Image (cartoon, rainbow, N blue to C red):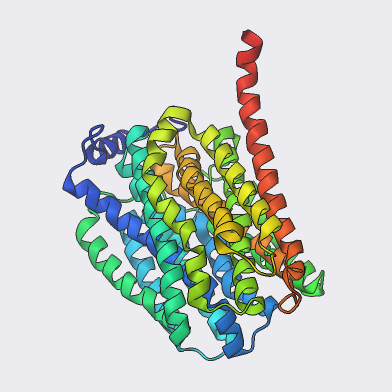
């Protein structure tokens, strides 16, 4: 079902770019490959920085509270502008937005490797996040507008996920190797990938994947961007500083700007965000699942990285290899996700994914603090369960979040779900780092409050998904 009426131009564009069911030519594979490289780049960067955090903190004299801003600075820019980035891709042209943002991403990464001050590094991470806020929804909307809804899109999204898993696993191992030499190399490495993606995208992504009719709601864009930036800043600062005058001011500013945004969107003829999209329950469920999945996992990765390197004194490469099975299992199983979605639907897949996440976190809570850990027994099962959760859930969340959306709003839907991923990560990580502050010398017990939070977030997501799934089945049971 299409939620908004498609214009003849949209229908023609969809017909021109969508493949015949089951038959993909070289051009379609090439487009998917280039879009997937952007996913690879984002996952590569996140995992490399996660491994390098302890070394960055030691070199630049940053404590745990300051280190969270290396991650959350990225999320601040990313989460604050994703919806604008998604809409810009729809209206300004996915190809143009994709290429321009990649250039900015590469420059910010290069500068990040050159700076010597913590605040400058955080500033480059914010700029990098802003760039990713435009590349990510552009890449995803290129996929969802090229491959029509149904088996083709499910298959394409499952392959899209493989790039993320490969990037994540590669980032762990590469960062482990590079951090052992110099953590700055982890910032230079993405520059090489960016250059390759720019060249490939310029050649492969056709100019026919272009802007939709309409115009950008600049008033709404300014209100939303300002409100999101203020909200994310408040979210990541309050757990560390408490409700200072600055936090109270940014809270009031966020509420005021976002309130004004919703009022504006109801009145303009070409809104930045069509508010009725939130009336679609499947899209709301997908975004809630995204909050729970990334919110819990990003904090778990940060906690485990700090625990293994700072407390157990593991080398960066040793820690990276330990967590690599998470990405490897995603890469192995993701090709099956499309067929599983076709067979079981997105709801059961998301439920199974969150169950796997909860199982992984509980396993680490029960066994991860062993004074003499046996990796195969104490750590590996948890990492494999998390990989299984990503393999089952990521494609399902993306598919559910974009199904039934017309081509001219695919960038919006893509930006919305990716905003949920990032906001979830920012909120939970900010609280988790506050809970584990000063835990470096306290053994696993110092990290348990953060691990309890991670597990609780995943459990809440699991219960929400289960409740939604049962509610959908209830009318059928009554008829029976």
Q: Is residue 152 above or below residue 140?
A: above
User: Front-most of 335 and 129?
Assistant: 335
50 lies left or right of 35? right
- The count of marks equals 0
The quadrant of the rendering that contains the C terminus is: top right
Q: Is residue 292 above or below residue 13?
A: below
Query: Residue 380's quadrant in the figure?
Result: bottom right
Residue 459 x/y as whole percent:
69, 45
At 19% from the left and 61% from the top, the residue drawn is: 203
| Extreme residue in the left direction | 26
User: Front-most of 158 and 34?
Assistant: 158
At 63% from the left and 37% from the top, the residue drawn is: 465
56 lies left or right of 151? right
At 44% from the left and 87% from the top, the residue drawn is: 181
User: Front-most of 365 and 238?
Assistant: 365
The quadrant of the rendering that contains the N terminus is: top left
Q: Is residue 92 above or below residue 60?
A: above
Residue 121 x/y as whole percent:
54, 82
Query: Residue 166's quadrant in the figure?
Result: bottom left
User: Front-most of 387 and 236?
Assistant: 387
| Extreme residue in the top direction | 480
Residue 297 x/y as whole percent:
59, 57
Residue 45 x/y as whole percent:
45, 69
Q: Is residue 124 above or below residue 80?
A: below
At 59% from the left and 85% from the top, the residue drawn is: 118
Residue 8 can be seen, yes or no: yes
């Amino acid at each position: 079902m299409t939620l908004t009426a498609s214009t003849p131009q949209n229908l023609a564009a969809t017909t021109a770019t969508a493949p015949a069911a089951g038959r993909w030519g070289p051009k379609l594979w090439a487009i998917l490959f280039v879009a997937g490289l952007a996913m690879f780049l984002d996952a590569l960067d996140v995992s490399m920085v996660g491994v390098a955090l302890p070394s960055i903190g030691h070199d630049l004299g940053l404590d745990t509270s300051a280190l969270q801003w290396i991650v959350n600075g990225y999320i601040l820019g990313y989460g604050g502008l994703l919806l604008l980035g998604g809409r810009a891709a729809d209206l300004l042209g996915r190809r143009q937005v994709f290429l321009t943002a990649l250039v900015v991403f590469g420059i910010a990464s290069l500068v990040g490797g050159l700076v010597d001050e913590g605040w400058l590094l955080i500033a480059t991470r914010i700029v990098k996040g802003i760039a990713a806020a435009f590349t990510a929804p552009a890449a995803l909307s290129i996929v969802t507008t090229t491959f029509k809804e149904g088996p083709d899109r499910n298959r394409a999204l499952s392959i899209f996920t493989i790039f993320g898993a490969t990037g994540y696993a590669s980032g762990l191992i590469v960062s482990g190797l590079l951090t052992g030499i110099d953590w700055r190399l982890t910032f230079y490495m993405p520059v090489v990938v960016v250059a390759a993606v720019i060249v490939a995208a310029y050649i492969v992504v056709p100019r026919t994947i272009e802007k939709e009719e309409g115009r950008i709601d600049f008033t709404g864009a300014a209100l939303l961007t300002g409100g999101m930036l203020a909200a994310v800043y408040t979210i990541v600062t309050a757990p560390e500083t408490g409700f200072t005058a600055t936090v109270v001011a940014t809270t009031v500013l966020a509420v005021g700007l976002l309130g004004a945004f919703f009022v504006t969107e109801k009145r303009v003829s070409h809104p930045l965000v069509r508010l009725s999209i939130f009336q679609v329950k499947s899209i709301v469920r997908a975004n809630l699942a995204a909050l729970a999945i990334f919110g819990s996992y990003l904090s778990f990765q940060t906690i485990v990285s700090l625990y293994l390197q700072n407390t157990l004194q593991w080398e960066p490469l040793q820690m990276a290899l330990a967590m690599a099975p998470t990405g490897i299992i995603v890469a192995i199983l993701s090709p099956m996700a499309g067929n599983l979605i076709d067979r079981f639907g997105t709801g059961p897949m998301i439920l199974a994914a969150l169950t796997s996440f909860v199982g992984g976190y509980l396993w680490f809570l029960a066994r991860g603090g062993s004074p003499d850990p046996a990796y195969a027994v104490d750590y590996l099962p948890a990492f494999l369960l998390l990989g299984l959760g990503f393999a089952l859930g990521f494609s399902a969340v993306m598919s559910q979040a974009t199904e039934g959306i017309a081509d001219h709003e695919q960038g919006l839907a893509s930006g919305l779900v990716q905003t949920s991923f990032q906001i979830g990560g920012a909120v939970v990580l900010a609280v988790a780092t506050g809970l584990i502050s000063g835990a470096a010398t306290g053994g696993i017990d110092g990290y348990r409050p953060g691990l309890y939070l991670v597990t609780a977030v995943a459990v809440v997501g699991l219960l929400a998904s289960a409740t939604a799934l049962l509610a959908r089945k209830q009318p059928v049971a009554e008829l029976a």
